[in-house]
């Protein structure tokens, strides 16, 4: 804590013990004040402290609205929960270091978040199969601009007054988001106004296009979008569940106006290793995105911020850092972990376990465990993130480098979307931790909706020794730079560091193996490499490799015409300081006319050997073979000087404009002479 800060800690009517000595040891430089009933009897103490100005941390979130109202704009206040996370626990007497760590971490500044706007004018399409869709429209007609689309409509009663359109059809495809949906409807037909006993429809047609701001799906059919619950503006309910239908209707009623959503991902297209020259290399993000917000866009991908739901799997998997999570950025999360673990250690804590969780599920579960169970163990440090799937290798490596004994990720028993990306991250972290001497089982998930199961799992964890030399580095820079730094510091702090660790397939670190005999030094791989891991030499045919820059995108392997390149996933901690590895080097071929070096000597000689005396174009013609031995400039000159014809037969010179003009003048003169005679 570099700035002057005051910390107000309340025992909440003595329901939790306060170890002020531990808090002062951890939060050095801060003024620590205690209270027993800060939000009621001692509110004047808060008012006086807030009026003094400066940075203020209040160890209470339950009464945050009250404190914010009392303080007004006098003080900049940070609120942090130490009651449910530390004080209300069977281990509360030993939770002083944890309280200090939570208070210090809460003071870490958070970067500003950018937003994207979604605009809805309230045009809603209700897609259903029977009268229930029309009943939902009746509830919404006074609030939104309603259209009802009935699939396979039959036995619908005509309405006395047409208050909103009722049409029939089946949605063939849908795309878009809140405020910008576009659907294609087959079997589309409008009703006949003269319908009497039941609603009749005109002749149907396919391919009708409709646009709307909201989609209320009561059809009972499969969802129109992947990860449908993450698509803003798409509401879906089982038509057989009246309560679910009512909830969807009430939610739709409020979706009119302008809404801001965070821009979860910052994307730098120049760093993307998706493709080069229409050859696809990296496609990790495309494989993992649950909402389809990511699509190919030439040599890179494009991320639709309006569709993105913020799971963060693309950022966690991106090998180059082109896609980076912004809520918060990886370096901000790592600084928070650094403060949390270093403060916990300074305050006298030992064997810290970092518990990563989300707000909607994890916070509620921790709260329930504190109120109705044994609470969190004193050595478990909870860290809330937006989504667990945003956690990348850099966060895991940094946690252990900073001194964590273990990392646990609290997931739902049934995750709300696919967690394949997170599982791959954990599968990548396991061999790294094991290879550096930390052992197996240091990182794991706890998948439960039961607070008692959570508590039992945390208390059953074996206490393992943290890194013997905890790191103190300050993370800064882009995602890839932060990841490299975190891994180097983890290696330095590890119990048994080694130089090279084999990694599973699809890892973003590794080397390449080249069959040197088959390599012709065409250097196609160099031009395809998006990170500069493969490099040439302007002076002579050379192929070099920088392992530290390789992201195992596979573009070199896919581009190589001789198919002599293979990938080898591994983590070599020496790569950051290693010199370029020479893969192959040959002498250039000197042009026989100007002596300019060009091509590869062995390749040119191989081509000459295959053509001389064997190809009909070069049989008995040393002059033609000499053309192959020339550089590109001399080759053009030689061919123009010798009328080089690849087919051997003489050809007429090409006719130019001057030739036509001379011919016309000659004919004109001949005509005049004939006229005179």
Image (tube, rainbow, N blue to C red):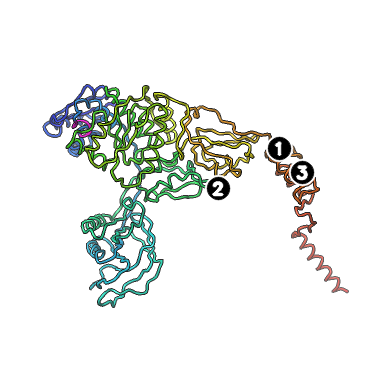
Instruction: Write down the residue under mark 3.
Output: 626
In this image, 2 relative to 91: left or right?
right
- Whichever of labels 1 and 2 marks the residue nearer the N terminus, that label is 2
Could you say which quadrant of the image residue 241 lies in?
A: bottom left
Magenta span of residues: 84-89
Place residue 593 in its image quadrant.
Answer: top right
Locate residue 198: give its quadrant.
bottom left
x and y percentages locating residue 42 in the rendered image: 13, 30
Residue in the foreground of this view, choosing between 235 and 241: 241
Q: Is residue 357 above or below residue 638?
A: above
Is 165 drawn above or below residue 492 in the view shown? below
Q: Name the disc covering residue 589, or none.
A: 1
Residue at 25% x, 30% y: name it: 103
Q: Are marks 3 and 1 in contact (CB under 8 Å)?
A: no
Q: Position of residue 630 (x, y in %)?
A: 73, 42
Using the numbered discs, state the Cα–Cα distance from disc 3 to disc 1 in whole angstroms.
Answer: 13 Å
User: In the structure shown, which secondary structural element does the residue marked by tag 3 occupy?
Assistant: helix
Q: Main secondary structure of the magenta part?
A: helix
Write down the residue under mark 2: 277
Image quarter (top left, top right, bottom left or bottom right) of the N terminus? top left
């Amino acid at each position: 804590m570099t700035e002057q800060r005051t910390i107000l800690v309340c025992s909440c009517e003595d329901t939790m013990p306060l170890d002020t000595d531990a808090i002062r040891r951890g939060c050095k430089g801060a003024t620590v004040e205690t209270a027993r009933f800060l939000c009621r009897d001692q509110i004047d103490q808060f008012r006086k402290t807030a009026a003094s100005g400066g940075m203020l941390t209040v160890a209470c979130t339950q009464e945050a609205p009250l404190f914010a109202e009392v303080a007004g704009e006098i003080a900049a206040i940070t609120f942090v929960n130490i009651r449910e996370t530390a004080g209300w626990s069977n281990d509360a007497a030993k939770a002083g270091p944890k309280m200090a760590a939570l208070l210090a971490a809460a003071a870490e500044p958070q970067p500003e978040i950018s937003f994207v706007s979604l605009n809805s004018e309230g045009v809603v399409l209700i897609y259903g199969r029977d009268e229930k869709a029309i009943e939902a429209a009746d509830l919404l007609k006074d609030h939104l601009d309603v259209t009802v689309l009935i699939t396979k409509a039959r036995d619908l009663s005509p309405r006395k007054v047409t208050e909103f359109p009722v049409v029939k059809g089946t949605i063939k495809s849908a795309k878009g988001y809140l405020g910008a949906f576009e659907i294609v409807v087959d079997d589309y037909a409008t009703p006949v106004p003269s319908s009497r006993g039941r609603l009749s429809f005109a002749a149907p047609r396919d391919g009708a296009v409709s646009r709307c701001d909201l989609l209320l799906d009561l059809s009972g059919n499969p969802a129109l979008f992947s990860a449908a619950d993450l698509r803003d503006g798409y509401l879906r309910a089982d038509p057989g569940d009246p309560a679910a239908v009512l909830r969807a209707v009430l939610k739709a009623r409020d979706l009119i106006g302008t809404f801001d959503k965070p821009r979860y991902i910052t994307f730098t297209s120049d760093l993307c290793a998706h493709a080069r020259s229409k050859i696809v290399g990296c496609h990790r993000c495309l494989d993992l995105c649950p909402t389809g917000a990511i699509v190919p866009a030439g040599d890179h991908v494009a991320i639709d911020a309006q569709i993105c739901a913020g799971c963060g799997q693309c950022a966690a998997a991106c090998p180059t850092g082109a896609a980076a999570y912004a809520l918060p950025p990886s370096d901000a999360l790592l600084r928070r972990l650094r403060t949390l673990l270093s403060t916990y250690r300074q305050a006298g804590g030992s064997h810290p376990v970092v518990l990563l969780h989300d707000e909607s599920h994890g916070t509620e579960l921790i709260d329930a465990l504190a109120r109705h169970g044994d609470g969190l163990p004193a050595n478990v440090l909870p860290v809330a993130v937006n989504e667990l799937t945003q956690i990348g290798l850099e966060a895991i490596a940094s946690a252990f480098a900073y001194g964590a004994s273990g990392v646990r990720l609290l997931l739902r028993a049934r995750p709300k979307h696919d967690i394949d990306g997170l599982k791959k991250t954990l599968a990548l972290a396991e061999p790294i931790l094991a290879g550096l001497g930390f052992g197996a089982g240091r990182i794991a998930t706890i998948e439960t909706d039961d607070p008692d199961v959570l508590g039992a799992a945390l208390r059953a964890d074996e206490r393992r020794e943290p890194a013997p030399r905890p790191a103190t580095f300050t993370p800064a820079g882009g995602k890839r730079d932060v990841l490299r730094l975190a891994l180097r510091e983890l290696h330095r702090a590890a119990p048994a560091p080694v130089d090279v660790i084999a990694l599973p397939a699809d890892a973003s670190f590794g080397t390449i193996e080249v069959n040197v005999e088959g390599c012709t030094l065409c250097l196609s791989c160099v031009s395809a490499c998006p990170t500069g891991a493969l490099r040439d030499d302007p002076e002579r045919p050379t192929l070099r490799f920088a392992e530290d820059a390789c992201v195992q995108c596979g573009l070199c392997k896919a581009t190589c015409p001789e198919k002599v390149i293979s990938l080898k996933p591994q983590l070599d901690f020496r790569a950051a300081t290693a010199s370029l590895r020479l893969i192959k080097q040959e002498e250039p071929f000197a042009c026989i006319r100007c002596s300019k070096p060009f091509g590869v000597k062995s390749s040119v000689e191989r081509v000459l050997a295959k053509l001389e005396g064997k190809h009909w174009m070069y049989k008995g013609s040393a002059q033609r073979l000499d053309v192959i031995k020339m550089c590109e400039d001399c080759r053009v000159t030689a061919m123009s000087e010798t009328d080089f014809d690849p087919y051997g037969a003489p050809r007429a010179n090409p006719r130019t404009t001057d030739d036509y003009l001379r011919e016309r003048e000659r004919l004109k003169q001949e005509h005049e002479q004939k006229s005179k005679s």
